[in-house]
């Protein structure tokens, strides 16, 4: 097992994490249909501690355009509603004392275009993260050559491997982006 193999394996892991993070960000973007993942980024101030909503309530999707949120602690309903209203989701919750209902309205054409811009921005952040991993690995490879640990040929071969890895991961992000854009624009 060479130092180069370690760098390439490390780069693969970090690039995979970047793609996964981008995918999770995409899931939190609202499309026309209800999804419990929409609420993944919502944090509630629960007795002074920011707590993820999914740790405080059961979230269900009883209909394609409706989410229901049933808090484990009924006294937290007001703070959950406030957190949803203050979020960037643009949704209006209503409750009956036990369950919060969150209707998902049809997206307007203008809002769809805004969401596509947002998703493209997230994809670009993912691509930048992947490229940063490549840059780090290339720097380490140059140090190995400078220190005389590996030869120029091995370095070039490793750079080619890392470039292919980078291209593959950027393509994965592109594929995720295309799918998410289509989902957003679907009426």
Image: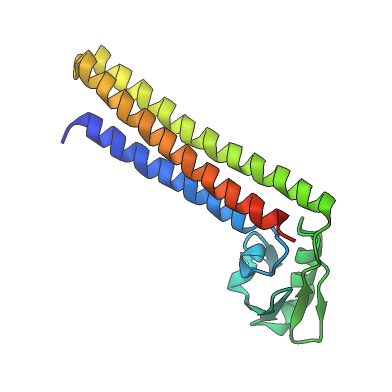
| 172 and 126: which is toward the camera | 172
x, y percent for residue 75: 74, 81
Residue positioned 68% across, 62% down in the render: 42
x, y percent for residue 130: 47, 36
Among the 4 quarters of the image, the one containing residue 105: bottom right
Residue positioned 79% across, 86% down in the render: 97
Horizontal side, residue 165 vs residue 109: left or right: left
Residue furthest to the left in view is 1
Image colouring: rainbow
Q: Considering the image in quadrants, where does the C terminus appear?
A: bottom right
Horizontal side, residue 7 vs residue 125: left or right: left
x, y percent for residue 4: 24, 29
x, y percent for residue 6: 25, 36
Up the image or down, 64 lies above or below 145; here it is below
Q: Considering the image in quadrants, where does the N terminus appear?
A: top left
Whether residue 48 is visible, yes or no, is: no
Residue positioned 44% across, 40% down in the render: 169
| 170 and 16: which is toward the camera | 170
Horizontal side, residue 80 vs residue 141: left or right: right
Residue positioned 47% across, 44% down in the render: 172
Up the image or down, 3 lies above or below 58; here it is above
Residue furthest to the front in view is 187
Among the 4 quarters of the image, the one containing residue 63: bottom right
Q: How many marks?
A: 0
Whether residue 163 is visible, yes or no, is: yes
| 20 and 54: which is toward the camera | 20
């Amino acid at each position: 097992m060479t130092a180069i193999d370690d760098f390439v394996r490390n780069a693969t892991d970090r690039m995979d994490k970047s793609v996964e993070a981008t995918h999770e960000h995409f899931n939190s973007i609202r499309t026309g249909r209800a999804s419990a993942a929409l609420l993944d980024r919502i944090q509630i101030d629960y007795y002074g501690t920011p707590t993820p909503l999914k740790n405080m309530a059961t979230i269900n999707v009883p209909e394609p355009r409706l989410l229901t949120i049933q808090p484990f602690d009924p006294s937290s309903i007001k703070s959950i509603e406030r957190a949803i209203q203050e979020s960037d989701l643009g949704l209006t919750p209503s409750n009956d004392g036990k369950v919060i209902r969150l209707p998902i309205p049809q997206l307007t054409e203008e809002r769809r275009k805004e969401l596509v811009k947002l998703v493209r921005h997230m994809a670009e952040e993912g691509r930048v993260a992947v490229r940063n991993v490549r840059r780090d690995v290339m720097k380490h490879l140059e140090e190995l050559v400078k220190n005389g640990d590996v030869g120029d040929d091995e370095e070039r071969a490793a750079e080619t491997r890392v470039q292919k890895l980078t291209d593959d991961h950027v393509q994965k992000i592109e594929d995720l982006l295309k799918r998410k854009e289509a989902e957003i624009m679907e009426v």
